[in-house]
Amino acid sequence: MSNKSPLPASYDKADIRRHYTGMASRYDFWGKLTESKARDRCLELAAIQDGEVVLEVAVGTGLTFYEVLQHNRNGRVEGIDLTPEMLAQAQQKAAQTGHSNYDLRVGDAYKLDYDDAAFDVLINNYMFDMLPEADFSQVLAEFQRVLRPGGRLVLVNMAKATHWYQTLWETMYRIQPRWLGGCRSVSLSVPLNAAGFQVEQREFVSQMTFPSEVILAIKPL
């Protein structure tokens, strides 16, 4: 898998908020069609133990957040997203669990409003593939800050193609980034190492030809 620089990001924060405001009520169809296998693997690698403190950054419509709540009935789960309309969808799902051990709020991955070493696990799905490569280090430094020593970070993003038929997705991004919600393929193992994480596992999942990378990294003790 090549670690060459990704294509330039096409969306700034205002663009992301605008696009996903319009997509909020329809996003789950796309998420279940192309991303559900990678999200399932994310949860397996996170290996959440009941009673842990978990943060999901960029919860979107709550597809993963809902499952985290089900795995962690006696713990605490926090979630943030940039787009209120996506959070509203996540809130509806969370309410269906009957749990009260969570908080969902508007938040920014660049500056997390949490104390140092506050979380056992941090999950982040399909966000870095929208960010400028130059910003990866700033966001990963925030993730490093809020995780406890030994804490687990699980990331899922659009991956670089490993088969010819997967190149369609990057071609679509080159033609019109909006078709992919501003997402393009990225590779995060090198930025993670540079940020001080230990990459424990790196896997690639394809669903409806859409390629995803799932990474488990640890904050050293």
Image (cartoon, rainbow, N blue to C red):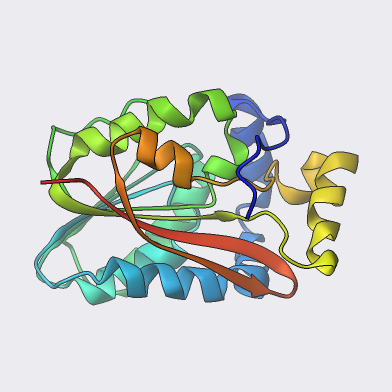
Q: Which image quadrant for residue 52?
A: bottom left
| Left or right: 172 in relation to 104 | right
**Residue 71: x %, y % from top left:** 24, 75
Residue 202, visible in the rendered structure: yes
Q: Nearer the viewer, residue 107 or 24?
A: 107
The structure residue drawn at horizontal position 60% and vertical position 43%, both measured from the top left corner, is 3
**Residue 56: x %, y % from top left:** 34, 52
For residue 107, above or below residue 75: above
The structure residue drawn at horizontal position 68% and vertical position 54%, both measured from the top left corner, is 160
The structure residue drawn at horizontal position 18% and vertical position 52%, both measured from the top left corner, is 151
Residue 107, visible in the rendered structure: no
For residue 20, above or below residue 40: above
The structure residue drawn at horizontal position 67% and vertical position 51%, both measured from the top left corner, is 23
Q: Nearer the viewer, residue 221 or 176?
A: 221
| Left or right: 43 in relation to 191 | left
Location of the N terminus (image quadrant): bottom right
For residue 65, above or below residue 175: below
Q: Nearer the viewer, residue 15 or 91?
A: 15
In the displayed orientation, state which residue is furthest to the right: 175
**Residue 7: x %, y % from top left:** 73, 35
**Residue 75: x %, y % from top left:** 12, 64
